[in-house]
Image: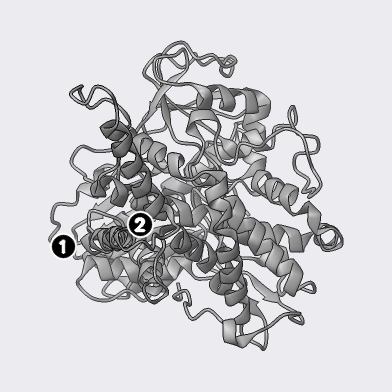
Amino acid sequence: MDAAAVVRGEEPVVVILGAGPGTRPLVAEAARRGWRAVTAEVTGEDPAACRAQATGFLAAPGSPARAVLVGRGPAGRAAAGIADAHPERVAAVVHLDPEPGPDPARHRLLCPVRHLSTADEQTMAESVGELLAALDRAGERDRHCPVRLPVPVPDRFHQPAAMAELRAAAPVHRVDEPGTAPWWLLTGYDAAAAVLDGSPGTAGCDGSVAITHGFRLQSPDLAHHGGQDTITVDAAEHARLRALAERCLTPDRLETLRPRIRRAADGLLDALPADGPVDLVRHFTRPLPVLALCELLGVPVADRGYLQEWLLVRLASPPPSAHPDVDEFLHGLIDARRSAARTGAPARDLLAWALDAGAAARASDAEAPDAGAPDTGAAAQAPDPADLVAMARLLLVGGHRPPATLLANGIAALLAEPAQWRRLLADPGRLGPAVEELLRYVTPAPVGLPRTVGARCPFPAAAPGSEEPPAGSLVAASLLAANRDPAHFTDPDVLDVSRTGRPHAAFGHGPQRCPGSGLARLTAQEALGALLRRLPDLRLARDPADLHHRQSTVRYLLELPVHPGRDRDRDPTRATAVTPPAR
């Protein structure tokens, strides 16, 4: 592979979004420059439909890891949207439009953008060729910098080798790339713990901040905050809702969900196809976390397909498109809990627990000696329905992807190391430590929430030649680098299901710990327990090196083909009817 492939990804590819006038000379010019040109079937005038078609092409197995996207009219705007949401996949965008209209996305993209309004096919092809030559020259420059540290762009956050290079050089690195907000990446366990431990007003870090893909500060003109995999709330609201959830998600209450999640896991395994290799992502690791959330919120079985369709399909289309029907659905669940409580048959789920806590708080304040005092007691913290809806939405959106990533990547890692799988079969009592080791080894969310420095940082010095993060600057901890820090973990790049000792940072640390960590642990324990109990002969149907991952800020498997072997406890009458949609 030549040096230009460093810029272009795994291979030099131009993806033409929809065949049309100028395709033939463009293909010829790309070939002349040493680039392979492929055409994706993208048709129609609706930019959203064009984007969906282009995204489907790029998500398919065998698609280029990084490419130049060329599109005409709506397809060109779709290319810009993909580059905005997934900058790690797009080396450049070329928008062909003889009558260009406003396209605000092109001004905030991280990659080069060329807007061509010429109708002359040869002129257009030559202009694209000049862009490809410029990318080639950028690759040649990289060739002459063999010791340059990897630029920590989003798709490298999940690469242990890249993060290890940065961690070995220094625990703190300034990142100041064109088109991004200047920020600092923390790559050591101690540095990560220091920034995550900081609380408002201390010599650490203040609140998290709203941020977009590629660590660009959120534009005030857009209603959506954060990446499309996170909920649309600002940092203060996120902290308030997280605290509300933590008050209700006690260990004892979560344990009451264990039998229900075990039944959900068994139901999915009972529904596995009987013949041939089975895609464990489609049939098990992706739907189970959603079913666990349904159990947490008390979603009726008949409504679980609706909620699954919202989480796994509709959320793939980023805001500003709103989903008011989901809020209405959650309000309906709250009303049902109130009705059940009045009839003396209270439910056992998160919404019921929160309503009970609110009722108890109001009763406590009503019995206080000074009834005329201002309402500053427990009742002041009682949630209203809007709070409960926002909390439930936060847990749904933030709580389905990380557990699914952990399960798919973790099971693949175990099956790629048969000795580790056999150790668990021989001693199921290792299941708890094994889940903690998979959390450390996989690290489902490789980077913690960005935070702002409130005072001089209490962590070690930055890399040579760069200043320490000043007050007000943006910092984020690489949880993956922390979890692979050799100063804290022996043989950190080795998967060892019997590992004990220091806690990992997969769920964050201190005040920034994930509120859904208990549910994620419980779901992973029951998922692995069901597989070990029922499918002891489970094995990969494909070489681990050939598994297809989504290359993004989170590296997760798009499919996990396995040979299940003989099921020791199959019961078709328990089969779960809810099936995840095809991607």
**Mark 2 touches mark 1? (CB < 8 Å):** no
Residue at 47% across, 17% down = 204
- The image shows a total of numbered marks equal to 2
Viewer-nearest of discs 2 and 1? 2
Left or right: 404 as drawn, with respect to 70: right
**First reached walking from the N terminus: tag 2 or tag 1:** 2
Residue 314 versus residue 179: which sits nearer the camera? 314
For label 2, the crowd category at 10 Å Cα-Cα, with few meaning under 14, some 14 to 19 and many 20 or more, is many
Is 483 left, or right, of 229 in this rendering?
right
| Quarter of the rendering occupied by the N terminus | bottom right
Position of residue 504 measured from the top left corner of the image (x, y, whole percent): 66, 37
Q: Nearer the viewer, residue 366 or 515?
A: 366
Secondary element at image label 2: helix
Quadrant in the rendering for residue 339: bottom left
Q: Residue 82 carries which label?
A: 2
Query: Is 345 left, or right, of 459 in this rendering?
Result: left
Q: Quote the CA–CA distance across marks 2 and 1.
A: 22 Å
The circle on residue 98 is 1
> In the picture, which quadrant includes the C terminus?
bottom left
